[in-house]
Image: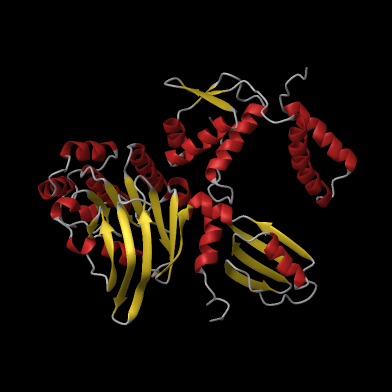
Amino acid sequence: MPFLRVDVSSAEPVFAQIVLGVKRAVATGRLRVGDRLPSVRELARELVLNPNTVAKAYQVLEADRITTSRRGAGTFVARHRPVLKSAERRRRFRKALDEALADAVNLGIGVEEARKVFEGALRRFHFEEQT
Amino acid sequence: MSAHDPIVFDRLTHYYGRTRALDTVSLRVPEGSIFALLGRNGAGKTTALDCLLGFLRPTRGRALLLGEDAAHLPPALREKVGYVAEGQRLVPWMKVRDLVRFQRAGFRSFDEDYCLRHLRRLGLPLKRRIFNLSRGMRAQLALSLALAQRPELMVLDDPAMGLDAVVRREFLEVMIDLIQEEGRTLLFTSHILSDVERVCDHVAILDRGVLRIDAPLDMVKARVRRFHALFEGEAPPAPAIPGLVRDRRLHNELVLTVVDGDEEVERACRDLGARRVDCEGLSLEGLFIDYTAGRDLEGEA
């Protein structure tokens, strides 16, 4: 996965960086439903990491239902099925957004500029059609 | 914790004359783990490894290697441990090929074919004498010889010392392949914290002979936080907080590194008059510095 980058001098645990990288790749469409992820062994070699670290990231991804693994076949990007209630999902999203907006205010970004950046970001991600 | 932990330090203490190098160090290296033993120069890492391999008798306490007291290691057990010494300590006048033969004679489990294959793959000249090899080649040779023993356990004392980034990367790749073979346990020391971060799952930090940290790296990162408290005037001395690792005063800022501290730390700072308190996680390097830089830099005892 050439888009996955790991920063070994970060405060963020390495396994958490892999989890976030894959989640972002799924959200932006670099990885699509049904795509196969490299095996733990392959990814450990590619990123020069302890395979136990990669395995831990894969366990978290599966627990979060981002991926699903089929015995002997490998790990695949799963069809998205929300597990949280819609109120909880909205609460989490609002919290993440609050943090980003706090940064925007502290950076001195005006409301119009923030809106423009937000609109731009929306276009970079793949949202599922709401029914 | 299990009875089968391949390495156990049990209140290990060692004195060189009147100088204490290790002070009641107790830790266990779980089977299959990649365990990094960290510390500044002179912290006691090599002393601990020398006790573990039976080169040094501890003053008090003991080290267990694969369940046996390291002070009385049976030769058969020694074969199960691959060891790469600091600076490698290879016979300098021997040719690579002869050293491989020599090693085969010393270890029944030694796999000569594997060793030669490995050396050829790395491009090591078999006819060259050890003293004519580069530092990187010597490190690769020492590692190949240790691996060819097919050991259950690998002990590497600062294998990255003096190696350039490319050789270090090759070395890491070999280590990762080694981990892929299940059940292998690896204990190593290093000063290259970014390499440690790539391969280790467990860290221990020694500071002047005392064990300060012994835990999975992810857990340490999750539990240790650095707080920055800003004051209007000169920052006050650090409040008494449980789990305080290090405190520093920088003009109007008080920097506190704390284990398991949260709102409590923030409240304590606000009680002292802080107008703002920020909190950050730490990289392994940040952790290492805060645990080992000590108070000697601030002139406090």
Count how many numbered circles sit on residues in the image.
Answer: 0
Occupied quadrant, residue A100: top right
Q: Is residue B67 visible?
A: yes
Q: Relative to residue B247, is residue B22 drawn left or right?
A: left
Residue B29 point in image, percent of width and height: 36, 53
Left or right of residue A24: residue A54: left
Image color mode: secondary structure
**Does residue B134 appear in this view?**
no
Q: Position of residue A40 (x, y in %)?
A: 45, 32
Question: Horizontal placement of B6 versus B245: left or right?
Answer: left
Q: Nearer the viewer, residue B3 or A99?
A: B3
Q: Residue furthest left?
A: B105
Who's the residue at 43% across and 38% down the image?
A51
> x, y (%) of residue B92?
19, 57
Along the viewing direction, whichever of B168 and A72 lies nearer the viewer: A72
Q: Is residue B295 above or below residue B83?
A: below
Vertical comparison of B121 with B229: above or below: above
Q: Is residue B216 left or right of residue A91?
A: left
Residue B11 lies in quadrant:
bottom left
In the displayed structure, B8 sits above or below B173; it is below
Quadrant of the frame with the C terminus of chain A = top right
The quadrant in which residue B253 appears is bottom right
Decide: is B256 above or below B83.
below
